[in-house]
Amino acid sequence: MSDQSEFSYKMTGSSYTANDNDEVTISSEWEGTATGFGAVFGTLKATMALTDANAANGPCTFVGTAAPDDGSLVLGIGEGTWERPAGEHKWTMTLTMKLSNGDRIKGQGVSDSATRTWTGTFGPA
C-alpha cells in the first residue's frame, strides 16, 4: 500500500436509537471502494446528547469489511472523532483502523449530507 490512498463511499441507509441518558446514536451504512481494498462495506456510528444536537465535535466508530481483488476478506474496527463547522451539513471524520490482516491505517474524510457521500484519504497509522 502506498503512503497515500483514497476512499469513496456512498450512504445506503441510516438508523437512530436513544438510550436512557437522552443520548442519540446515529448509525449510517456505507459502501464504496478504497485503494488496495476493493469493495468496502461498513457502519459509522456517532453518539451525541439530545440537548447538544448542534455539537461541533465528538467521538465516532467505523466497523466494516473489505473485499480485495485477491479473494480475501479484511475486517476493520476504527475509532476516531468527527468535527462539524456551525451551519454546515458536512462532517470531517478522522479514524484509526485496526485491520484483521495486522495493519493499522489512519484516514480522514468528509461526509456530505447533501450528496450522501464520504470521501477522503488514508495511509499507514
Image (cartoon, rainbow, N blue to C red):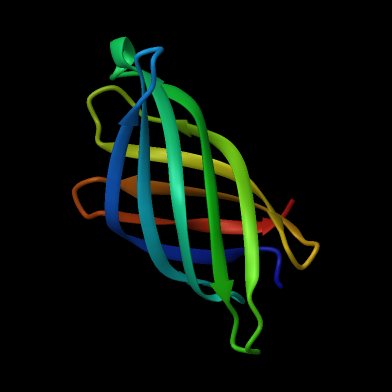
Quadrant position of residue 76: bottom right
Residue at (33, 32) in percent of width and height: 17
Could you tell me residue 3's position as x and y percent?
70, 64
Name the side, left or right, on which 57 lies relative to 61.
left
Residue 29, placed above or below residue 93 = below
Find the residue positioned furthest to the front: 20
Q: Total of numbered circles in the picture?
A: 0
The answer to which of 57 and 16 lies nearer the viewer is 16
Residue at (77, 61) in percent of width and height: 103
Residue at (64, 64) in percent of width and height: 75
Quadrant position of residue 46: top left
Where is the N terminus found, in terms of image quarters? bottom right
Residue at (56, 66) in percent of width and height: 65
Name the side, left or right, on which 5 lies relative to 87.
right
The answer to which of 83 and 19 lies nearer the viewer is 19
Could you tell me residue 10's position as x and y percent?
32, 62
Residue 118, placed above or below residue 19 = below
Residue 102, placed above or below residue 89 = below
Could you tell me residue 82's position as x and y percent?
47, 33
Residue 38, placed above or below residue 93 = below
Name the side, left or right, on which 17 lies relative to 83.
left
Name the side, left or right, on which 75 lies relative to 26.
right
Find the residue positioned furthest to the right: 102
The answer to which of 99 and 18 lies nearer the viewer is 18
Find the residue positioned furthest to the left: 114
